[in-house]
Image (cartoon, grey):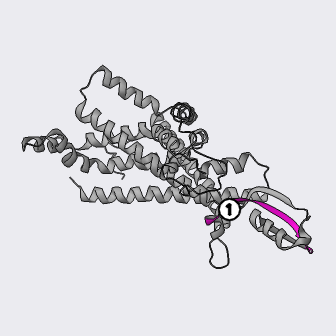
Amino acid sequence: MNPPDHPFSPRPDGARRLESAVFWIFRAAAYLILACGAAVFLDIVVKGSATVFQSKAPFVNTAFLTQAPESLYVFEWEGQPRRMGDREFRAFKEATPAAANVKAESYVYSSGGIFPCIAGTVLLVVGSMTIALFLGVCAAIYLNEYARDGRFIRFVRLAILNLAGVPSIVFGLFGFGMFVIFFGWNVSLLAGWFTLAFMVLPVVITASEEALKAVPIGFRAGSLALGATKWQTIWRNVLPYALPGILTSSILGIARVAGETAPIMFTAAYVVRDKLPWEVERAVDFLFQGVMALPYHIYVVSSKIPQNEFTERVQYGTAFVFLVIVALIAASSILLRNRLRTRYKW
């Protein structure tokens, strides 16, 4: 004899079947997005690692990671196919007079390495995030700790939310007009830093303000009751406990800043530059010089030159190194955030 059904047990009906179907549609959509993302990353990792790593010692393509981009020359010499970079090809012709008139096919940016692009990308990310965190945290402290809620403050918060949806190309044009032309900084690191910093400011301000709001009000009240000033309370009792959340905003900002091409195209990036950023005559010249950058290099190699098997190798290798650098910078922020979260538990 079957036991009677529980009065509160779910009974199958049309609404529950519809809810179950919708649930599985959402689940399938989520898995499909994850699968597409995994396929893209796997394709970059497989093809890019073939450029960065090699089967012979030292097993890492050090030339690709330490040299500047060069043109590749492909030719035949004494019945054997040869591939040489620009510098090696010129040295070969000087050392071999008979090869002075050898016919060679050239492929732009298909030899050498991407070290100047790596250096430029790291400098752009570190500099812009430093500016964004300083300005963003200061703005969040004012909005959360000092400002009184009113029409103007509500308008400011609405403006910050709207700025988060502005396309990056608009920030690039703004930076070009403001920093490159009006301030006369030309295409430089400084112009790129401020343009990228302003682009990521909405994310930093919003996340930092939410982190400050999450700190219990009792921390402030207790500090003020013991005679501390408003700023002493913020500096010693609020900011340390809000730092993990603030660093979360930096992680989100790093991913966006590092991957942007449009803003730096107008303000900071060069297609090719002979000198590294620190090879300057005066210290101030370091700030007022353009740099090469990995996302812009990928854009140029992928769309501005004829495509072939040699450029494909550079494209995937650059993309792979770019992902590794972004992951390392973000991982450093995550480790620092977890460390601070353990230290300032409440």
Task: Establish if 95 lies above or below 213.
Answer: below
- Examine the residues drawn in magenta and state their main secondary structure: strand
- Asked if residue 198 is among those painted magenta in the image, a careful observer would answer no
In screen coordinates, is 94 left or right of 139? right
For the view shown, which residue lies furthest in the top direction? Answer: 151
Q: Position of residue 22 (x, y in %)?
A: 51, 39
- For numbered disc 1, what is the local secondary structure? helix
Q: Position of residue 203 (x, y in %)?
A: 42, 39
Q: Nearer the viewer, residue 37 or 153?
A: 153
- Identify the residue at image location x=41%, y=42%: 132
- Identify the residue at image location x=47%, y=40%: 194
Task: Establish if 204 lies above or below 108.
Answer: above
Q: Which residues are magenta?
A: 66-79
- Identify the residue at image location x=48%, y=53%: 283
- Identify the residue at image location x=28%, y=34%: 142
- Asked if residue 75 is among those painted magenta in the image, a careful observer would answer yes
Q: Position of residue 266 (x, y in %)?
A: 60, 38
In screen coordinates, is 6 left or right of 177? left
In screen coordinates, is 16 left or right of 272? left
Q: Amino acid at mark 1?
A: Lys
For the view shown, which residue lies furthest in the front direction? Answer: 281
Residue 216 makes an appearance in the image: no
Q: Circle 1 sits on which residue?
A: 47
